[in-house]
Image: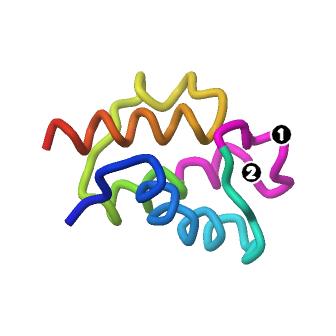
Amino acid sequence: MPPADRDAVYKEITPIFRSVFGNETLQLSYQLSAKDVAQWDSLSYINLIVAIEMRLGIKFGMGEIAGLANVGELVDVILKKLRKT
């Protein structure tokens, strides 16, 4: 069953972030962004998005993910997608 609320989404995607960025202690927060994670570049962002899509069974459009400023905005998009399915 897909995560239904913000806390459940964070719990579901934290291991993905940790794996993609090779940091097992990474703590997600609403404000966390690329500038806060040394390994976060355009390629790792693509890997992150693909891994989230596969894990949650959703698909992002480029327009949905291109302008996101932080993890919180990504979680907002995820929640909208999950509520549509």
Tag 2 residue: 40
Residue at coordinates 53% horizontally, 27% vertically from top-left? 66
- Image check: 46 left or right of 77? right
Mark 1 to mark 2: distance in Å?
8 Å
Question: Is disc 2 placed on a helix, strand or loop?
Answer: loop
- Residue 29, given in percent of the width and then of the height, sits at 68, 47
Residue at coordinates 64% horizontally, 55% vertically from top-left? 44
Residue at coordinates 30% horizontally, 33% vertically from top-left? 80
Mark 2 neighbour class, 10 Å CA radius: few under 14, some 14 to 19, many 20 or more: some
Count up the numbered dots.
2
- Image check: 72 left or right of 11? right
- Vertical relation: 28 (above or below) 72: below
Tag 1 residue: 35
Question: Is disc 1 placed on a helix, strand or loop?
Answer: helix
Task: Please report whichever mark, 1 or 2, sits nearer to the chain's N-terminal start.
Answer: 1
Q: Nearer the viewer, mark 1 or mark 2?
A: 1
Pointers 1 and 2 in contact (C-beta within 8 Å): yes
What segment carries the magenta color?
30-46
- Residue 49, given in percent of the width and then of the height, sits at 47, 50
- Residue 30, given in percent of the width and then of the height, sits at 64, 40
- Vertical relation: 77 (above or below) 8: above
- Vertical relation: 56 (above or below) 61: below
Q: Name, please, the residue furthest toward the left.
A: 85
Of 14 and 59, nearer the camera is 14
